[in-house]
Amino acid sequence: MSLYEISDGILETHVTWEDIESDLQQKLGTNATFGANKKATNISDMKGFMSRIALIEPDWQNVEEGKELPDKFALKISSQLALVVVSKIMNFEGGEGFTEEKLKHLSKMTRECHNREVEVYKLLQKFNHPDVPYTKVYSLKSFESENDLKGYMAIDFVSNIHSLLMFQPIKADDLFALVRGIATFSALGETLTPEETSFALGPDYFEMVYEQFMNKTELTKKFEGFRKKFGGDHPEKVEKLIATFFHYLSLVKKYTKISELLGFKLVLNHGDLWQSNVIHSLI
């Protein structure tokens, strides 16, 4: 079995109801069980490609007197199922999506990214700083080996979320709290030992992502598609777009070494910071 194969667990992953029930009983200190009306709803479609996220409604039964348990929570399950779908949508390998060989290669990256996210949540819990708010955590499960198929995070469900697309702007005045949080987290990271931050991905991750998803072979295929679809009406704009892509591609190694070029020290930071990966409150 693998992370890119459909299984009989929650949202077709390898994580089962029994796994989550047993884990939360231990983490929440309860003997209550999930009821017959337990429910898992997929809330992650087209919102990423390295996990499936379920809204879990456990329908708790036999809850101890005075015990408060979450009536719903989000379960982020690390999986390659979404990656398979996205690779087809993005027309990789001529529309067939990533090959099994490529998916096997990417499984290591999937596990590493998940485990690093788990470690970051542990740091957030350790710091517990008011300027760095984070979602309440009920349970964190890392991948324990390259054969482990069950990595997940059970966290508080935040309702009434409106997702922003990548091209939608956010007013500068609305970013002060976000920038303060990023800076505070990086500063707090300076209090940690090298061993405590050894889990973090280095600058070479940037190159690795480009090599896997935006290498010259794949970009050339996509540019051919651009020319066929838009070249007839907007040839100049298409060629300008393609030239821009190749220009940025040529700068990847410089971006990777930007801290050295500018004389800055590497610090702990968010590796995928954009609109849909942060939560802004309107209150």
Image (spheres, rainbow, N blue to C red):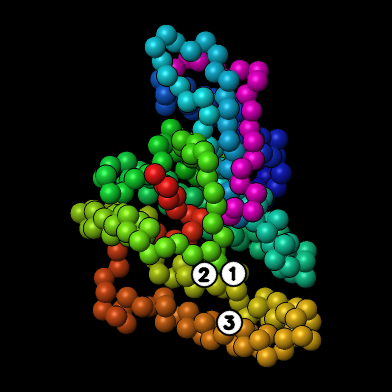
- In this rendering, the answer to whether 91 lies above or below 134 is below
Q: Which residue is depicted at the point 68% across and 59% down?
A: 86
In space, the residues marked 2 and 3 are separated at their CA atoms by 17 Å
Dot 3 alpha-carbon crowd within 10 angstroms: few under 14, some 14 to 19, many 20 or more: some
* Residue depth check, mark 1 versus mark 3: number of the one nearer the observer: 3
Which of marks 3 and 1 precedes in the sequence? Answer: 1
Dot 1 amino acid type: Gln
Query: Is residue 40 in the magenta section?
Result: yes
Pick the front one: 141 or 104 = 141
Q: Indicate which disc residue 208 carries.
A: 2
Question: Which residues are drawn in magenta?
Answer: 30-48
The single residue placed furthest to the bottom in the displayed view is 236
Q: Which residue is depicted at the point 54% across and 49% down?
A: 162
- In this rendering, the answer to whether 131 lies above or below 172 is above
Q: How many labels, in total?
A: 3
In space, the residues marked 1 and 2 are separated at their CA atoms by 6 Å
Residue 209 placement, left or right of 115: right
Dot 2 amino acid type: Met
- Residue carrying label 3: 245
- Residue carrying label 1: 212
* Residue depth check, mark 2 versus mark 3: number of the one nearer the observer: 3
| Residue 7, image x, y percentages | 70, 39
Confirm whether residue 57 shows in the render.
yes
Element at label 3: helix
Q: Which residue is depicted at the point 38% across and 64% down?
A: 172
Look at the numbered discs 1 and 2 and tell me whether their residues touch, using CB distance below 8 Å: yes
